[in-house]
Every structure is written in C-alpha cells, then in structure tokens.
Amino acid sequence: MNITIKAALLGSALALASPALAAGTHPDTGEALADSQIYTYRMLDDVKSFDPQINTDVEGSHILRDLFEGLVNSDPQGNSVPGAAESWEVSEDGLTYTFKLRDAKWSNGDPVTAGDFVYAWQRLADPATASEYAWYMELMGVENATKIVAGEMAADMLGATAVDDKTLEVKIDAPRPYFPGMLTHASTFPVNQKVLEEHGDNWTKPGNLVGNGAFVLTDYVPGVKVTRERNEMYWNNDKTVLEQVVALVINDENIALTRYDAGEVDKTDVPAGQYPALKEKLPDETYSTPRSCSYIYMFNLREDGPEALKDVRVRKALSYALNRDVIVDSILKGGQYPSYNWTHQKTAGFEMPEIDYATWSQDERMAKAKELLEEAGYGPGGKPLELTLNYNTSEAHKKIAIAASQMWKQALGANITLANFEWKVHLDKLRNGDFGMARYAWCGDYNEPSTYTDLFTTTSGHNNGKYTNPKYDELAKAAKTSANPAEEYKQMEQLLADDMPIVPVYQYTQVIMVKPDLKGYPFEDLMNNVYSRTMYRTAE
Amino acid sequence: MLGFVLRRIAMAVPVILILIVFSFVLMRAAPGGPFTKERALPPKVLENINAKYGLDDPFLVQIGTYLKNIIFHFDFGPSFVYQDRTVNQIVADGFPVTLTYGFWAFFFAVLIGGALGIAAALKQNTWIDYLAVGFSIGAQALPNFIMAPILVLVFTLWLSWLPGGGWWGGPGDPNSYSSYLVMPVIALATSYLASIARLTRSSMLEVLNSNFVRTARAKGLPDRTIVLRHTLKPALIPVISYLGPAFVGMITGSVVVDMFLSTGGIGKDFVQAALNRDYSVIMGITILVGMLTILFNLLVDVLYAWIDPRIRY
C-alpha cells in the first residue's frame, strides 16, 4: 500500500503544472486575465450523445452549444442574438424566414453553408434518424415536418431550403413571433454532411467530430470527463478567452462540493437545503437564480380516476391547504418561488394573471379550503378523503411529499398515502392513469410561455391527468397566431386556477457555486443556456 | 480432471442461454422503456424509434435476432440510451477500469484479510485477536457509500494527496495512474477484507482444534510445520469458495465506487442501464457477469481438488 501512496504523492505534485497560458486582458472589458484559462465544472451524469440531432438532455446541450453553433444564440441575459446567421428577415405574413449566414468555417476548415442546416434539419425529421426530438421540427412548425416524421413524405420536402450557400429560407405553417428563439435549441444545430458520411456511426468520436462552435472536442473518457479546447477556426475566435473546458462526471453532489472546496471544479450544484449555510460562508460564490422549471402535483381527472377529484372544490381545497412557504423556506431553502400558477413567472412574454388565492394569507387559504371541502361533502363530518400521492425516488421529493401529506392531514383531515416509485415506473403509472395525485415537473424548452401552457391542452403528451377544457384548447391555438399572446397565456393560467387540474408547488431556481475569479457565467438567463465562450478567468 | 473441466464448460452453454432468455423476459416485463420520458413521444416518433431498434418485432424474433448477432458477429447491439456507443464499446471502455481496481482490491483484501485472520486464529483470545476481530467488524460495518465521501474529504480536501475521483487519462494526465487507484481500491477492498479475515479466522480455528492437529502436536511436530503443512490448506477451503464469486463481484465493479469516485467502470453502467431500461446494455453486462461467474466457480472447483486430495472428479 505504501508504494501506491508514494506514487500518488508524486502524481499530485505534478498536478500543479498547468498546460495552458493566456495572460493579458479581456478583449471587451479590459479586466486582467489569469494565466491559466481552464474552466472545469461538475456534470451530474455522462453525456448521452454528442450528436445534436440525437442528444436529448440539458447537460449534453451545454456541450453541444460549445461544439456547434445554431442560427441564433442567446446572450448571457437570455436574449436571442445572431449566431451562425448574421441577420434574418421575416415575411409580412410571418410565414417565411430568410436567414443570412455569416462567413464561418467548420473546425476542419470547410465553409459553413445553408446546405449544412438543411441537411441537419432534414436529418432531425427523417424517420431513418429516429430522433426523439423529431417532434421539435413539428413544434417549430417547419413546413411538411409532420408528414416527414410520419413517413408520408421524403425528408427533402422539408420547408427549409438553401437559396444559395449563405441564404437559408424557412417556411413555417403559422406565424410564431418566438420562432428565432426556438433556434437556440441544440437539435437545430448544423452538422457537416461530409464528416458524417466519412465516419458513419463514429463521427462523434474526438478527432472525428467536426463542429462550427467556439470549441472542439479533444477528449472523452466515458463516465469520467469531457474535454474541449479552443477552436481556432471559429469566426469569433478572437473573443474566446478560455483555452480549455472540462466537464467532470460526479454523481454525488456532496462529493462534488468537497471537490469544489478542494479546487478541483470551478462550478458545482448546491445540495438541497445547504444554500443558506453556504451563502453565509461563501457569499461571493453562492448563487440562486431563476431557472425555467415548474414543480406540481398533477390530479388524475380520468373517468376511472378517484371520484373525489372529479369535484373541483376538492381539488381547490387540496391546493389551498398546501403551505408552499414552508416547502420553499424550510425544505428546499434555495430561494425557490412558492407557486400558485403553472408557467415559471420569469418566462419572457409572460404576464402573471391575478390569481385570487395567491394574494390570500395562508390562514385565509386554510379557511377557504375547509369550507370548500365541507361543501363537497368530504372531511370531518362527511366522507373521508383518501388519496394516493405518487412521487419518484429522490430525497427532496420525499420530504416535500411528507410535508404536503401532513398539511393535508392537519388542515383537511385527508388521508394521503405516499407511494414512492423508481423513475420509469413512476412515468409508466402516469401514462396508464394509475395514480390519484402525482409529482410532476417540467423545464421549458425555450423562453416563451407556450412551452408550459401547451402541456395542458387535451392532446398533449404530458397531460396524464387528462384535464380537458375546450376553452383552454382554443386559447392555446389562438396564442400561436396572436399578435399579443400574453393575453391568451394569462387567460389560460386563469383557467388553470379556476379548474385546478394541478397543484402548483414551486418554481425552480438554479442553486450553484461558482469560483469568484470565473466571470461571464449567464446567471441572468432563465434557460441557463451556458456558452463557455462568454466565460473567462480573471487574475486574482 | 480434463474430462470434468470439459463437461463443466459444455454445461455452461445452456446455463448462459437460460440466463439470456430469462433476463430478456424479465427486463421487458419491467414497467417503462428506454424511451419513456416525461413527455410521451408522439406516436409517429416512437414508431420510428421502435423500427430503428427492432422493438416493433414480435418478441421471439427480437430474442432470435439478438442471439444471432451475438453468436455470429459477437455484436451485443447499440445502447438505447448512450446512442453514440455500442454495448461492445461500453464494456470495452468500462471493464478494464473495474478489472484494474477490482484486481488490486482483491489482492489487498486477500493479503491483509488473510493475514489478519490467520494471526487472529493463531493468537486466539490475545490482544492480536481482539484487534483483528475489532478491525474487521468495523470495516464490515462501514458501508462504502459512507467511506467514499470520507476518503475524498481526507485525501483530497484535507491532505491534497489524491485527485477526488476520475480515472487516468493517458500520459498527458497530470496525476499518476496509481493516484486514481488508491481510493477505489480502499473503498472496494475494505468490506471484502473484513469478510475474508473473519472467514479465515473461524475456519483456521476449526482446523486447529481438529483431531489430526492434536495428533500432530502429540507426536511433537513443531508449531511451524503444523500450521504451514497441515492446517493452512484445509482451512483455505471455505475461504476459496467465498473468493471465487467475490473476485467476480470485484472485477465487475461496484456501483458505489463508480458513482462516488467517477471511475467510469461497468458497475455504474450496469445499474444505470437498469434504471434507464437500456435493454442491450443490461443484457451485455449480465452475460459478462454470468460467464465470469461460471468461469470462476469452475476455477474454485479445480482448486479444491488441488488442496484436498480426497476430492476427485
């Protein structure tokens, strides 16, 4: 054992030498830069895929935004700004977008052309690719996308065409004012056809992968780390400061925090409940900023669902009796927002309607809850209210569910049985309507309210409680073409508060630690779309 | 002996086949699938995916294709979740890792555990015995999911001796190869070490109190000869039957080590695949573990015959 430890000591001495040197000042802000421009962060899980049209998860998207560049980027505040497209125009009817591409190169030196986008988009919709995000082309409303995904039309009929090498024309089926914002999504990123055809299934391996982003993939150790380095070919390379970005896979958040303290990672997540203590200890490194996700309990409103939940008064009573402040302040403790509506309140273009019970005090809510439940004939003196609450395995979900069931027990005398399931089983039970109430959460795909409101339309793939209100569906449809959809969204939220098909619980914050010398992290972006090229390390 | 080995290998074939069919059926019976997500995929999209992976074929066709690909092409299929990688690649990436730390963990567990057990038995009811037994009970009681975070805290944060996890990335890596091994080996070896120590001690004691040892003492043999020539071999039999499966368990990795120390081994791949319903990966690793188990059980049986001349095949 001794020999191993000695060798280890020698190894850690060598670790002090750093490979990258980039002293100087920041090109825009003029701040003095650190010699070593390496950014290392903690990643919860391994990357599922480096293929923009195959990837489905958030951490993978972060890497893809470094390796590739879509038509539109978001800036650190979350606004849409030109990316691979220099500018774009929209026709008067709002149905045709013309994107002018800037002069940019792939990391192998090939020029980035409109054809690369057409190829990637057709690839996304093509049944042969079998992408899980094929529906995103449909969501964007690109002409013929639905028929292509259904296999009724060839992929080259997609409503995206290269007018010339630098001009991309996109036809969509209905005006969508937020269309450019949807193009920040990684599934719309271009890929280099030549490279894909040359390497086949191995095209995403380091060394083979060719991208048009600010970084290139240089190393991938599955389950351990992903390394990317500056792409000299990137059109705006002069503004890239970081030389190397490393993602370390660390599953356990407490170990990740220890490694953050040891200086091994520059950014990590704060374990649930530890935010106040860390904020006090390290106020300049601990952050809680809005994150576009919403946490709810969904009611099962199906025919064969629990009888009690068919009564809106019971649903309202359960929602009113839930003390969100306790959940947020005593369990989560990370600055999350107690929630009385569905859409994350910081979503761009969202105006909060005046939801009555949001303005009441908790005592008023309790009183109203008791009253409603009594009217419905449940609770003390009436039928006993007995329901099951399903949640998927997680410490935080468990704590919240226990607290909620206690609140319902005390306020309403309701007997809520808690049922914990592994994730896939939880989803399966949701799909099959095998639940009374179920924990659910959704993170927006893009920064616009429809990414939330669409979920409770009658035909939505999320609507497992089978809530249906024709008025809601009509509003959802109208919002797609409305000049000022904020009004429709407001009315939809109002309907959700009136019909109460869900219990809003809380809206997320991103609770993280970031080393004080690391600048340019997009704290203000609700979507947390990180682009490593905006970050840099200052000299201390 | 050769006949015995050949017979056992021939028997392994149907065992593996049964294992494959059984795991295949069980896995498909579990609720949810690899593409079950929060959002139900639109039916057309799901159809395309099922067609790509052959999930729309009848069950018997699926299992037939699966077996055919393994037997004729040694192809265990693509991962359903890690879509850039095949099962062959996942095992090729992860198995060398678990094999390495598992081997060293086994080596130290046997060496230290065995030595502790023998010392405790020879000096029964002395302070050496108490210390060895106390140590092994402590080691057994300390689960590795507690130990791993403590190791990182001590070796990485407090002492700054070792990287807090990960695996050697090649000659360009600033840390040495062995620096990545220390924590996984300690975390994995400890509880095995404790079991080996206790098993060795009790079986050693049993042999030391047996009639033939008493006879050996009565005829005046020196202690050294009694222990080395007459006691050690018979005392090893129960230990060896434990070591076979233990070795397989160690080299196929530990989910705790892989999760907490980010080693990238197949221990984590296996558990993640089960949670993700990554059918092909679960099958691939199950088959690997199954074959290794059969192999090492066979090895143990052969060792028995070598240790105990009364055993003949």
Image (cartoon, grey):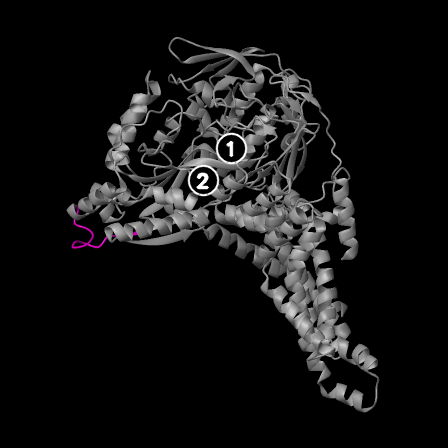
Q: Which residue is mark 2?
A: A334
Q: Of the residues tagged 1 and 2, which is closer to the observer?
A: 2
Q: Main secondary structure of the magenta part?
A: loop
User: Is residue A386 found inside the magenta-colored segment of the image?
Assistant: yes
Q: Which residue is mark 1?
A: A130
Quadrant of res A298: top left
Pick the residue in front: B99 or A54.
Answer: B99
Chain containing mark 2: A
Instruction: Inspect the image, locate mark 2, and give the three-letter code of the amino acid beneath it.
Output: Gly
Instruction: Kindly tell me whether residue A180 is visible in this rendering.
Output: yes
Pick the residue in front: A344 or A305.
Answer: A344
Badge 2 crowding class, 10 Å Cα cut-off, few under 14, some 14 to 19, many 20 or more, is many
Residue A164 placement (x, y as % from top left)? 56, 9
As drawn, the residue found furthest toward the front would be A280
| In this view, A510 is above or below A419 | above
| In this view, B269 is above or below A71 | below
Q: Residue at x 65, y 40 (%)?
A: A264
**Looking at the rendering, in which quadrant would you find the N terminus of chain B?**
bottom right
For label 1, the SS is: loop
Chain containing mark 1: A
User: Is residue B249 found inside the magenta-colored segment of the image?
Assistant: no
Give the magenta-colored segment's residue range: A376-387
